[in-house]
Amino acid sequence: MPESHEKKWAHGDWRADLVAAGGEFIGTFLFLLLGLGGIQAARAASIAQGVAGSSPTGEGAQQVSVSDPSFLLMASTSMAMSLVFSICIFFRATGAAFNPNIALTLVLLKIITPVRFVLYCIAELLGAMAAAGVLEGILPGGLNVNCAPGNGIGTAQALFYEMFLTFALIMVVLMVLIEKNKSTPLAPLAIGFALFATQLAGIQFTGAAVNTARAFGSAVATRTFDGAHWIYWVGPSLGSLLAAALYTVMKAVHYWELNPGADATSPTEEREKARPTQADRASADTHV
């Protein structure tokens, strides 16, 4: 951490919230600019090879029926890697949420204030719109990155699938980034891998938004809001609630005591962590 002789931002300073929100805007913009750009490139390549068919569904928008495993791999890798480097840049400054649904979990757990939550959501939605708008204006052809339920996927199925995918992603964020431990420096990679898994599992069926800003930004840029768009607001938000509930339960039962020494780097450290301290014994005595 950089040394500082004086503290620039006081706790609760609204100016700090604004600056942090600015970082969330830039981070979300970079994340989705490259992530969605990679999806656009993957779909263009698949269509050019005749692997995935396409049919116009709106002004400048296309719905592609995905049938190419290489497309899934390229799209998932693009989203995951763009998130990794964006987190590396901003997570010490803003927490690197880049996702209103992650921000919702953080405010429910009182990790961020309601003011910062509102500012983060606005910044993330604007960042997503800006990224998709730049891609729409720069790349040839209509932007083809919208989220929509796949063939044979009903509304309820898409809703709950988005909920569970988002829940999985947020739990990784909570356990490696919010819960400080020896794996926290590797948080960008862990979260990137989590997003990679959700994209592989979900692109075919729902588009794997797991992020309301991601779905909203592309819909605004292409001016295409279908009847299922609400799924990408409700589903990920339900995932946020589920993650907050599980995290609260895990903290309440002192999950770290169930497997003491799990993050130890040597047998000696493992024994030290597993051994009850004097404070632990005193606390136990008071509850007898």
Image (cartoon, grey):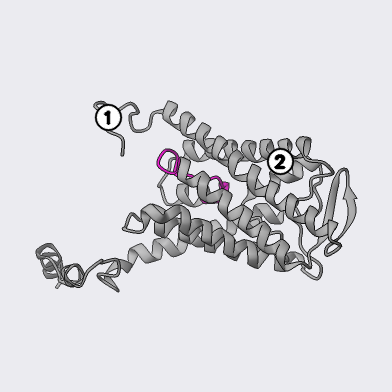
Hey, what amino acid is under mark 2? Ala
Q: Alpha-carbon distance for marks 1 and 2?
A: 38 Å
Q: Could you say whether the residue bearing mark 2 is in a helix, strand or loop?
A: helix
Q: Nearer the viewer, residue 192 or 162?
A: 192
Dividing the picture into quadrants, the one containing residue 92 is: top left
Q: Is residue 81 left or right of residue 58?
A: left
Q: Is residue 50 above or below residue 118?
A: below
Relative to the observer, which residue lies in front, 157 or 259? 259
Residue 178 relative to residue 267: left or right? right
**Number of the label disc, if any, that sits on residue 4:** 1
> What is the magenta segment's predominant secondary structure?
loop
Is the residue under label 2 in contact with that under label 1 (CB below 8 Å)? no
Q: Residue at x 45, y 39 (%)?
A: 94
In this view, the residue in front, 109 or 73, is 73
Tell me the magenta residue range: 90-102
Whether 285 is drawn above or below 224: the answer is: below
Q: Amino acid at mark 1?
A: Ser
| Residue 34 appears in the rendering | yes
Q: Earlier in the sequence, mark 1 or mark 2?
A: 1
Residue 160 visible somewhere in the drawing: no
Q: Quadrant of the N terminus?
A: top left
Q: Residue at x 46, y 47 (%)?
A: 107
Q: Residue at coordinates 59% horizontally, 40% vertically from top-left? A: 30
Neighbourhood count class around disc 2 (C-alpha, 10 Å): few under 14, some 14–19, many 20 upward: many
- Please name the residue that numbered disc 2 is placed on: 132
Relative image position of residue 229 (x, y in whole percent):
75, 52
SS at circle 1:
loop
